[in-house]
Image (spheres, grey):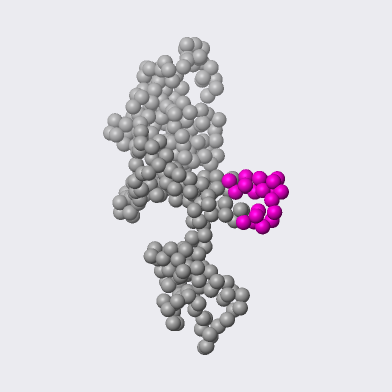
Amino acid sequence: MEAACERFFRQYPRYKDFSWEASAEPRDAFLLLAELGGFDIAAMTGLFLGAAAYRLPAVIDGFISSAAALLAVLMCRDVKDFLLASHVSSEPGGRLVMDQLGLKAPLDCGMHLGEGSGAVALLPLLKMGAMVYENMSTFSEIHVESYVDYGAKKGRLVMKALLMAFSMYSRLPVPDFVWEEEDRKKAMCFFPLVGVLAGAVFFLVYLFMERSGAGPVFKGALLTAVPLLATGGIHMDGFLDTCDARASWGDREKKLQILKDTHAGAFCSHRRRAVPAFILRRLFGASGAGGRQPCLLDSSCPGL
């Protein structure tokens, strides 16, 4: 084969430094096939051309069939739209031909077995892709929101979500705006930022107290008040809700019902008694008659 190539370049010296990708014409591909190709390559070249003519996809196997595919593309550029690369052959020219075709093979297993083994290995992947395409549920069928291209509104929506996050978890004054359920989901992305800024404020106050030489009582009181002032007590609200549910001594459904209850706030008398009730139960482990846990809240608790 090497001798045949040398004879070809001696007979046609213009092809020695020829740019096949930029300058090749169909007659160049026919000449190359006639001078260097065999009947097998000629047959596969015709197969790729015929598949494109009938608008059928054709799977390229290894190095030899990829050379035939390249010849078919040089003869007709539209053939490339119907070619599917199966694998990258381990032969030195295999990757070069794929690069020339501009195709990326999904398999790179170091194969050069011949006999169509690479193309056959691709078929299960093609079948799997077809099954996913035909049988996968749509977003509407599984109740998933479709992607929305916000375009020019993106900056305004991001700013609105940022302000919403700060209005929910901080006392930072923000402009008034209409709250929408869609914006709540986007605001969750900025919750970590709110936490970082609140923590930074707490840390700066702590450094100031350390360097000012304040007494421990004043320092402790201020460091306790700063998080409440910075966040509006939102974390205390969650803590009291948890204590309220735990101190009810009800089943799981009862506790979840208490956590979801929006009619009682964190600072009402009912919630204030939940904290000492929970603490007393943990300290003394008391139990009532028959092993039932005593309820220290009110008549709405189970067992009263």
Residue at 50% from the left image edge and 77% from the top image edge: 296
Q: Position of residue 162 (x, y in %)?
A: 44, 43
Of 82 and 145, nearer the camera is 145
Report which quarter residue 299 is drawn in: bottom left
Residue at 42% from the left image edge and 71% from the top image edge: 253
Report which quarter residue 282 is drawn in: bottom right
The stretch in magenta equals: 201-221
250 in relation to 220, above or below: below
Of 161 and 272, nearer the camera is 272
Residue at 44% from the left image edge and 28% from the top image edge: 101
Residue 152 visible from this viewpoint = yes
250 in relation to 16, above or below: below
The prevailing secondary structure element of the residues shown in magenta is helix
Of 11 and 251, nearer the camera is 251
| Residue found at the very far left of the displayed protein | 54
Q: Position of residue 110 (x, y in %)?
A: 55, 39
111 in relation to 7, above or below: below
Answer whether residue 220 is magenta in the image: yes
Of 271 and 72, nearer the camera is 271
Q: Position of residue 131 (x, y in %)?
A: 35, 50
> In which quadrant will I find the C terminus?
bottom left
191 in relation to 15, above or below: below
Residue 115 visible from this viewpoint = no
Residue at 61% from the left image edge and 53% from the top image edge: 222
Count of marks, rendered view: 0
Answer whether residue 92 is magenta in the image: no
